[in-house]
Amino acid sequence: MTANQLKDLEHKIDELISLCESLNRENGALKADVAGWDDERKDLIDKNELARSKIEGMIDRLRAMESKV
């Protein structure tokens, strides 16, 4: 290998290392986003269940009031 070829190879390896580091950072950020979205999804499911429960309770109370009339 000539000196030029070695320098080209070294440059390409440096670029690959840089790309790997960048992809690792991006992957970490994406994993953090997914974890945040998962937490948000769980919160929304809990809120939805609470709302459903409250609405069912109101419907039951309305039916009870209706049967008294």
Image (spheres, grey):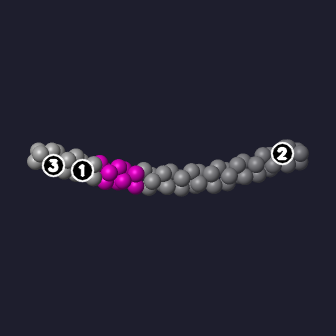
What mark, if any, has residue 58 been given in the picture?
1
- Residue wearing tag 3: 65
**6 or 52: which is nearer to us?**
52
Q: Secondary structure at mark 1?
A: helix
Is residue 42 toward the left or the right of residue 35 in the image?
left
* First reached walking from the N terminus: tag 2 or tag 1: 2
Contact? badges 2 and 1 (CB < 8 Å)? no
Residue type at numbered disc 2 = Asp
Locate the N terminus by quadrant. Answer: top right
Amino acid type, callout 3: Met
- Majority secondary structure in the magenta region: helix
The answer to whether residue 24 is visible is no
Q: Quadrant of residue 66?
A: top left
The residue singled out by tag 2 in the image is: 8
Q: Residues within 10 Å of mark 1 (few under 14, many from 20)?
A: few
Q: How far is mark 2 from mark 1, CA to CA?
A: 74 Å
Residue shown at 84% from the left, 45% from the top: 8
